[in-house]
Image (cartoon, helix red, strand yellow):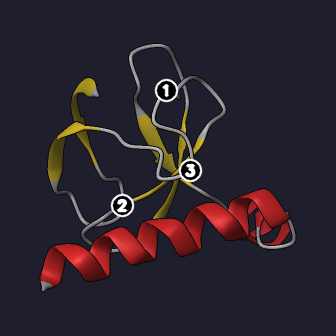
Amino acid sequence: MSAGTIECPWCGVRCDDATDPTDDEARPKAGAVGVCLYCSGLVLFVNDRLAKRRATKAEVDELSRDPRVIRYVLATQQLMIRGKK
């Protein structure tokens, strides 16, 4: 799904796509959590233009206890592994 050009706030890689490995129909929106496929940085979508920002340490601590986020991160890691083969 095209998300416009977005830049990872961790590694600076520019991407023009966003994928939810757990739901093909999902669209990123403000407040959504993302994982960079290049550096695995945890990011938050902050507005309708899909700007991203780094998750703070407190947010990472909170998100790391959310089973949905854990499943999402693991699914994203699987996508990364398949892409490197």
Residue for badge 2: 36
Q: Is residue 30 above or below residue 17?
A: above
Left or right side of 73 for 83: left
Residue for badge 3: 22
Q: Nearer the viewer, mark 1 or mark 2?
A: 1
Residue 8 in picture, x, y percent from top left? 30, 52
Q: Amino acid at mark 3?
A: Thr
Q: Amino acid at mark 1?
A: Glu
Q: Depth check: 37 or 75 in front?
A: 75
Q: Nearer the viewer, mark 2 or mark 3?
A: 3
Left or right side of 44 for 60: right
Residue for badge 1: 25
Q: Depth check: 8 or 78 in front?
A: 78
Who's the residue at 87% across and 71% down the image? 65
Mark 2, Cα crowd under 10 Å, few <14 / some 14-19 / many 20+, is many
Left or right side of 40 for 72: right
SS assignment at label 3 = loop
Lower sequence index among marks 1 and 2? 1
SS assignment at label 1 = loop
Lower sequence index among marks 2 and 3? 3
Asked if residue 40 can be seen in this view, the reply is no
Residue 59 in picture, x, y percent from top left? 76, 60
Residue 69 in picture, x, y percent from top left? 71, 60
How far is mark 3 from mark 1, CA to CA? 9 Å
Q: Depth check: 78 or 43 in front?
A: 78
How far is mark 1 from mark 2, CA to CA? 19 Å
SS assignment at label 2 = loop
Who's the residue at 62% across and 37% down the image? 32
To which quarter of the image does residue 60 belong?
bottom right
Q: Amino acid at mark 2?
A: Cys
To which quarter of the image does residue 57 belong?
bottom right
To which quarter of the image does residue 83 belong?
bottom left
